Image (tube, coloured by chain):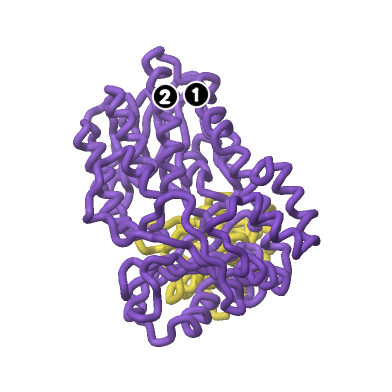
């Protein structure tokens, strides 16, 4: 497995990743509607982000009614990203 | 479920069910699909609508009527208010019961209706025309063919996006919102009055708060703010502040959230073999974001064009575009005016708006026409003239 961020030139902020705060998220889907690359998925009450598709554009974070989305620094050293779609929950020790 | 239908509709909200009703009435075979486990749930809406539009689609049923509204009150941040009667008879509905009644009406007319059935992709023929959907129902995937697909899957519509229709507007043209169903409000709300609270700096940046009474002691209380002004303070935080001030000690019976585009309808709402209706086509009112009645009318217009098109065996975008013209002729100018009005309200300082409400509160509004009201306001606030010109040019006022 390799680190997708090193390959993907579409990232706006290679040093940032989208983080979903599951404790705050109401699974309303407001973010899904504004995601240009279609990288957010709502399955039932579970919101997931496909980090490989996400361009860190930050629109979803602006849109979130409860402030559950944010771009967080990638913790060093870089960790491999598992296949998508994946949950970002618990993968960042910000 | 059959292997082929005349029309497949993705989404059983008011617009989707309205489309299903009109399609079934036209003698077409209809499949109406809802991805959620229960139609109408979760409710993501203030639940206010005009009463006339739904009644053109289904008979009245007291089970979906929560409350009748006599007046709207617009408050400034100082608590001063203007009270006006609604432009058409307004009710607060129980969206869960309402949406299910509409879907059931479609069903009674012959449509096949399924919840827990998600459209996961579109089928295209060799010319690229949409000719059906792939769907997932109870864990099983299948393909169902259709002569026409209707995208009625709401603000986060993926069906319209797959068909290449969906544009994603700038964040300034989105509301992000949250609503509480509050209880324990007896004596603190007037069940006959819908309240709007506007304060672009201190209450709801770029948006407004509402109190829509569902009964004598419960109300939908919510906020929308412009998505480009939603940080660092989230919509939820603005709502909590308001509730703490307006009705401290109220109980929160339910929490619902969502986002809504407030651009006015998409320019392109059709492609070969597909039409978008309701929130999927951004048909909500670009000032208040109300969209129940508008979505149903949009769906009706779509079927008005689609039924004869199907009869003639021509579902090309060129033919279906008559729907876009129908919409533009009826709502184009009004939506442009409401859009501009929101921009004006958003740019106005809070002090200015406060003063405007104060002036209007002293006027006998119930006996005045809209142009009279505008003239009265302009006398006291000549600065408004510049902004009023925008409204005149878009046709809302003083035609």
What numbered label is drawn on residue B113?
none
Q: Is residue B156 above or below residue B318?
A: below
Marks 2 and 1 in Cβ contact (< 8 Å): yes
Q: Is residue B122 left or right of residue B261?
A: left
Q: Secondary structure at mark 1?
A: helix
Please tell me in which quadrant of the rendered image residue B145 appears.
top left
Q: Is residue B37 left or right of residue B185?
A: left
Please tell me in which quadrant of the rendered image residue B30 appears.
top left
Please tell me in which quadrant of the rendered image residue B192 appears.
bottom left
Q: Give me the chain that's purple.
A: B
Residue B291 position, x and y percent, is 46, 49
Residue A60 position, x and y percent, is 57, 61
The crowd level at tag 1 (other Cα within 10 Å; few <14, some 14-19, many 20+) is many
Q: Is residue B316 left or right of residue B187?
A: right
Marks 2 & 1 on one chain: yes
Residue assigned mark 1: B320
Residue assigned mark 2: B306
Q: Is residue A74 visible?
A: no
Q: Secondary structure at mark 2?
A: helix
Q: Say which of B227 and B386 sits in front.
A: B386
Residue at horizontal 42%, vertical 66%? B193
Residue at horizontal 48%, vertical 51%? B87
Q: Give me the chain that's yellow.
A: A
Q: Residue furthest left?
A: B108
The crowd level at tag 2 (other Cα within 10 Å; few <14, some 14-19, many 20+) is many
């Amino acid at each position: 497995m390799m680190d997708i961020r090193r390959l993907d030139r579409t990232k706006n902020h290679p040093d940032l990743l989208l983080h979903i705060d599951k404790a705050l998220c109401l699974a309303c889907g407001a973010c899904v509607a504004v995601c240009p690359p279609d990288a957010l998925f709502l399955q039932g009450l579970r919101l997931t982000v496909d980090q490989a598709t996400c361009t860190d554009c930050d629109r979803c974070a602006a849109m979130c009614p409860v402030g559950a989305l944010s771009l967080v620094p990638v913790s060093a050293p870089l960790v491999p990203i598992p296949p998508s779609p994946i949950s970002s929950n618990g993968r960042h020790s910000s | 479920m059959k292997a082929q239908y005349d029309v497949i509709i993705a989404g059983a909200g008011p617009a989707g069910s309205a489309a299903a009703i009109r399609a079934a009435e036209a003698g077409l075979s209809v499949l109406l699909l809802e991805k959620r486990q229960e139609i109408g749930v979760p409710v993501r809406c203030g639940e206010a609508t005009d009463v006339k539009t739904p009644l053109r689609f289904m008979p009245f049923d007291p089970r979906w009527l929560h409350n009748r509204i006599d007046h709207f009150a617009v408050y400034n941040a100082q608590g001063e208010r203007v009270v006006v009667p609604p432009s058409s008879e307004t009710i607060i509905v129980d969206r869960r019961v309402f949406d299910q009644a509409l879907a059931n009406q479609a069903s009674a007319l012959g449509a096949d209706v399924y919840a827990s059935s998600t459209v996961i992709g579109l089928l295209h023929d060799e010319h690229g025309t949409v000719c059906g959907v792939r769907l997932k129902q109870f864990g099983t995937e299948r393909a169902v063919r259709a002569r026409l697909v209707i995208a009625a899957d709401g603000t986060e519509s993926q069906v319209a996006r797959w068909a290449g229709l969906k544009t994603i507007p700038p964040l300034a043209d989105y509301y992000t919102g949250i609503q509480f169903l509050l209880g324990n409000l007896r004596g603190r709300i007037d069940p006959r009055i819908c309240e709007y609270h506007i304060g672009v700096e201190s209450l709801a940046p770029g948006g407004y708060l509402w109190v829509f009474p569902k009964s004598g002691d419960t109300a939908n209380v919510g906020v929308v703010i412009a998505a480009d002004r939603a940080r660092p303070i989230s919509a939820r935080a603005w709502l909590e502040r308001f509730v703490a001030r307006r009705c401290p000690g109220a109980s929160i019976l339910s929490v619902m959230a969502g986002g809504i585009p407030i651009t006015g309808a998409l320019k392109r709402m059709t492609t070969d073999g597909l039409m978008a209706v309701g929130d999927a086509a951004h048909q909500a009112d670009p000032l208040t974001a109300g969209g129940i009645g508008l979505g149903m009318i949009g769906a009706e217009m779509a079927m008005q064009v689609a039924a004869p098109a199907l009869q003639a065996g021509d579902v090309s975008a060129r033919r279906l575009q008559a729907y876009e013209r129908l919409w533009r002729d009826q709502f184009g100018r009004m939506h442009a005016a409401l859009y501009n009005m929101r921009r004006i309200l958003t740019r106005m300082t809070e002090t200015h708006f406060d003063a405007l409400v104060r002036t209007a509160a002293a006027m006998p509004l119930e006996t005045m026409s809209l142009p009279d009201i505008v003239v009265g306001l302009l006398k006291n606030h000549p600065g408004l003239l510049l902004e009023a010109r925008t409204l005149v040019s878009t046709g809302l006022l003083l035609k």
